[in-house]
Amino acid sequence: MKNVLITGASGGIGRAMAVAFARAGYGVAMACRAHPERARETAEAIGGRVYVCDVTREEEVDALFAAAEKDFGFLDTLVNNAGISWRGLLTDMSLEDWERVFAVNTRGVFLCCRRALPPMIRRKRGSIVNVSSMWGQQGASCEAAYSASKAAVIGFTQALAQEEGPSGIRVNCLCPGVIDTPMNASLSPAELAALREDTPLGRLGAPEEVAAAALFLAENEFVTGQTLGVNGGFLLG
């Protein structure tokens, strides 16, 4: 049986990913910093395990992987899904806010990848799926830090795919569009309506659709270094 570690697993997309991977026969390790009770409900339903971890802290990431490897053995796939956003004018943003966004969205990806890679390199196999955003592909007004941090994830993914390809390890990037999750709950009905109108498919995405894309990237043995948009065609215009 294959095993997967998913960060940010208490959110809507993370929990949908856990269910999708479990249905595909994976052992599922779910990591989160906030709302572990949500992750535990999902874990109980799928036979997974939950670990509390702040991915910005090196010692907590090391402890997370040590515990997950003890419980599951080799982790075939890592999904770096943990992320936060900050909306507002750049001139209203503090340095602390900026650094916090980058700490979670980019440092966390770096720390988790660096810790996951040595066992994968030894076995000459493994898959990493980094979750960016369509706003990492095209910057969004009032989301400068979020857009910049997610763009960094795309560049990091492409570089790491080239670096680790000779070791049989695939690294891909997933870029969700506007997905119907609690992260977007702060948007007003008018804002959500405008986003639907700007989406060629005319609706918001579902967490399960993002999860299906993550599973595809984890499973396809000849796909690496790719940036897959799951956005309903939002960036086509």
Image: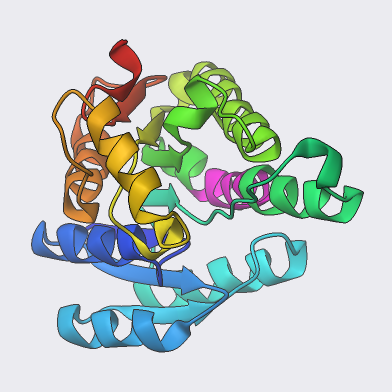
User: Which quarter of the image is occupied by the N terminus?
Assistant: bottom left
In percent of width and height, residue 222 lies at 24, 20
- Residue 53 lies in quadrant: bottom right
Using the image, determine if residue 213 lies above or below residue 53: above
Residue at (28, 31) in percent of width and height: 231
Using the image, determine if residue 10 lies above or below residue 26: below
- From the viewer's perspective, is 127 left or right of 158? left
Confirm whether the magenta stretch covers residue 92. Answer: no
Residue at (59, 51) in percent of width and height: 85
Region of the chain picked out in magenta, as a range: 107-119
Q: Is residue 1 visible?
A: no
Q: Is residue 72 visible?
A: yes
Q: How many marks?
A: 0
In percent of width and height, residue 111 lies at 67, 50
Residue at (63, 40) in percent of width and height: 146
Secondary structure predominantly adopted by residues drawn in magenta: helix
User: 18 or 38, which lies in front?
Assistant: 38
In percent of width and height, residue 107 lies at 71, 47
User: Which quarter of the image is occupied by the C terminus?
Assistant: top left
Confirm whether the magenta stretch covers residue 113. Answer: yes
- From the viewer's perspective, is 71 left or right of 97? left
